[in-house]
Image: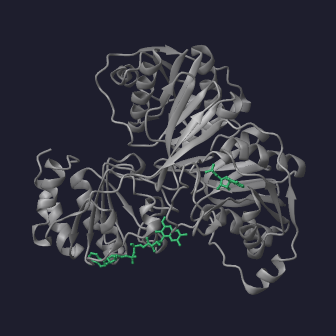
């Protein structure tokens, strides 16, 4: 029996969200008195794999087949299913990314496992019972869910686990799953990555977000400058992306993406309940709004009532003056 | 083209969420239910495809009788007929098995769902149904067009970018913004919806593998600390030294 963690690579490194999964996986393994193995697929540097030891991973199974450099669900599922068998894994951990959720669901069907996505905390394990806490009702509540199948598949909500760095080094072994052409039937025709010099929004620890109060796209340099001074990603409210001031992939909220950074700074956003649904699990929320009655202040930890065009330049200046 | 759209019945986006005294179920008192917002994108895209290429749009909900007003709303928006699988949606795998059973009987060309239900936030049902039926599931897609009678071209979001994929019918896709512009039912739609067929079927035997034990709500924030706008720079100091997030 062991715990298996699927880790995703990005530009040869392991994604931050996957380091969280690795930490989670080793902590579950400790509770169960076993070890945690990682499985990595596609282009990842060997040093990045051995470094997973820092998160408590003892062994990494690696499939470097170059056909897997892009995500192909069926092929990935086959490799991971093989790793589950080889390791007799009873717990399988993913990050709650688009990739993680897709393979998690397919593996749950194929291997007859129980699946919980959007998981926010370590499981409560008591004899035969295995209960995880997951976010439901778009951040308005949590549910405790008992996973009753033999194989428990867990997708961790981003930014809900502090990455540990105290372990050693992991050994790397190769794995391969006799993939056939049929497994690659769904290869994407084209993959277009956003041009970004900054931080990817779903992975970001700090997010600076602008709303309709920013008045127009020509003022977004304020949001961008503050973000770059803080090493943050940028986001926006729905009307802002609806008006094409900003691209759709930056829209957070009920109908956009959900973020849970350590710090969310909202500038000129009123704090409608649909917006809050996408950001309310951020650890610290800062609200800058000229209206003292803006509902967002009720959900905030820090607030400034003032004109964004006067306040944000002051923040940029103070942020640039921080020693890193 | 035969299109199936799966809709879930969820608390309105502005609803305050409370639970029953034993914390074992949602307290439905005073809660208004709506079609899951993402499913509305799927529904309108399906109707647009039907308008352009001909065919039928069937809506499917796995739920008890109280979901029928929203099924009727989907019919009013423009679906042709509806199926309700008469059972409480116990977990994603259970729901996926019900949807797969309906799909197996009816041979749909395209099955559209939402990216995620805003109550369970599972993001599971679409991929599970895809696996159960052995057909591709393109999740989450924000663009869907037919290239020819047999092939669709979709754009799906991936972390940090997008993928363009072409799939043969049949396939599943889950919708997210901006796949379509959701429609409001008009008077004529509301009138005709009353007479459109809504078939109620009993559930198939299916496993439940996740047991919802209790619900809880996040801790309330301790209150907001205000900083005067002229000392805005002070905020950065507090974020570093007090909140320790910088
Ligand atoms: C089904 C549904 C789903 C939705 N999903 C989402 C979603 O996913 N995400 C989302 O964001 N919204 C969503 N909405 C919309 C949501 O209800 C709000 O309309 C939206 O969030 C408002 O955006 P905003 O705060 O940018 O704009 P506004 O509400 O117009 O607020 C602008 C704010 O800027 C402040 N302001 C103006 N000028 C200045 C200045 N100079 N300095 C400082 N502050 C200033 C104003 O006081 C005001 O509070 C949804 C709505 C529905 C019905
Ligand atoms: N009870 C249900 N009945 C019909 N479709 C559903 C139901 N629950 C979920 N779905 C569909 O599956 C999608 C994803 O749901 P979920 O996996 O719960 O996030 C939703 O957007 C719906 O399209």
Q: Nearer the viewer, residue B23 or A322?
A: B23
Is residue B35 visible in this depiction of the protein? yes
Q: Is residue B42 left or right of residue A218?
A: right
Residue B136 figure quarter: top right
The spot of residue A60 in percent (x, y) is 46, 18
Q: Single out the residue that lies furthest toward the front.
A: B21
Quarter of the figure with the N terminus of chain B? bottom right
Q: Position of residue B74 (x, y in %)?
A: 74, 70
Q: Quadrant of ligand 1?
A: bottom left
Q: Is residue A321 left or right of residue B9?
A: left
Q: Quadrant of residue B45?
A: bottom right
Picture coordinates of residue A138, whole percent (x, y):
50, 56
Q: Is residue A63 visible?
A: no
- In which quadrant of the rendered view does residue A99 lie? top right
Residue at x-position 70% and y-position 38%: B208
- Vertical placement of residue B68 versus A175, above or below: below
Front-most of residues B130 and A130: A130
Q: Residue at x 33, y 36 (%)?
A: A162
Question: Is residue B114 placed above or below B45 in the rendered structure?
Answer: above
Q: Position of residue A90 (x, y in %)?
A: 58, 21
| Count of labels in the image | 0
Query: In percent of the image, x 64 and y 72: which residue is there?
Result: B182
- What residue do we see at 77% from left, 71% from top? B72
């Amino acid at each position: 029996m062991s715990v298996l963690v699927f880790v995703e690579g990005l530009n040869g490194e392991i994604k931050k969200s996957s380091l969280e999964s690795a930490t989670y996986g080793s902590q579950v393994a400790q509770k169960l008195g076993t070890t945690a193995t990682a499985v990595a697929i596609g282009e990842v540097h060997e040093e990045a794999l051995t470094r997973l030891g820092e998160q408590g991973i003892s062994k990494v199974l690696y499939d470097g087949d170059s056909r897997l450099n892009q995500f192909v669900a069926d092929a990935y599922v086959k490799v991971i299913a093989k790793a589950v068998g080889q390791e007799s894994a009873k717990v399988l951990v993913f990050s709650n990314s688009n990739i993680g959720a897709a393979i998690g669901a397919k593996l749950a069907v194929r291997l007859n496992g129980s699946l919980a996505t959007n998981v926010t905390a370590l499981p409560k394990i008591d004899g035969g019972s295995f209960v995880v806490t997951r976010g439901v009702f778009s951040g308005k509540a949590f549910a405790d869910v008992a996973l009753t199948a033999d194989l428990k598949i867990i997708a961790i909500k981003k930014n809900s686990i502090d990455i540990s760095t105290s372990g050693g080094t992991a050994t790397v072994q190769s794995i391969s799953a006799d993939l056939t052409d049929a497994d690659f039937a769904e290869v994407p025709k084209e993959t277009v990555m956003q041009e970004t010099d900054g931080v990817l929004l779903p992975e970001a620890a700090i997010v600076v977000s602008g709303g309709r109060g920013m008045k127009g796209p020509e003022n977004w340099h304020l949001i961008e400058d503050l973000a770059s001074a803080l090493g943050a990603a940028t986001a926006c409210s729905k009307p802002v992306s609806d008006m094409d001031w900003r691209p759709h992939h930056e829209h957070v909220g009920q109908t956009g993406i959900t973020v849970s950074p350590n710090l969310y700074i909202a500038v000129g956003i009123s704090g409608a309940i649909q917006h809050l649904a996408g950001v309310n699990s951020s650890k610290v929320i800062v609200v800058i709004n000229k209206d003292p009655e803006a509902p967002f202040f009720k959900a905030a930890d820090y607030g400034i009532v003032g004109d964004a065009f006067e306040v944000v330049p002051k923040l940029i200046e103070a942020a640039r003056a921080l020693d890193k | 083209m035969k299109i199936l759209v799966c809709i879930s019945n969820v608390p309105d986006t502005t609803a305050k969420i409370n639970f029953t005294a034993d914390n074992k179920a949602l307290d439905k008192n005073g809660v208004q239910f709506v079609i899951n917002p993402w499913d509305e994108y799927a529904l309108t895209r399906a109707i647009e495809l039907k308008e352009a290429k001909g065919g039928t749009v069937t809506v499917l909900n796995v739920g008890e009788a109280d979901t029928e007003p929203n099924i009727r709303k989907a019919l009013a928006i423009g679906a042709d007929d509806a199926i309700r699988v008469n059972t409480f949606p116990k977990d994603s795998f259970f729901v996926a098995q019900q949807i797969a059973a309906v799909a197996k009987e009816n041979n749909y060309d395209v099955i559209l769902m939402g990216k995620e239900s805003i109550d369970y936030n599972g993001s599971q049902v679409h991929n599970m149904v895809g696996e159960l039926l052995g057909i591709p599931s393109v999740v989450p897609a924000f663009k869907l067009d037919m290239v020819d009678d047999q092939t669709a071209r979709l754009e799906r979001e991936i972390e940090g970018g997008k993928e363009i994929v072409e799939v043969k019918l049949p396939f599943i896709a889950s919708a997210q913004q901006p796949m379509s512009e959701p429609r409001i039912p008009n008077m004529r739609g509301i009138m005709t919806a009353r007479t459109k067929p809504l078939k109620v079927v009993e559930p198939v035997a299916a496993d439940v593998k996740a047991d919802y034990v209790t619900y809880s709500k996040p801790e309330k924030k301790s209150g907001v600390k205000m900083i005067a706008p002229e000392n805005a720079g002070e905020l950065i100091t507090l974020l570093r030294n007090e909140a320790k997030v910088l």
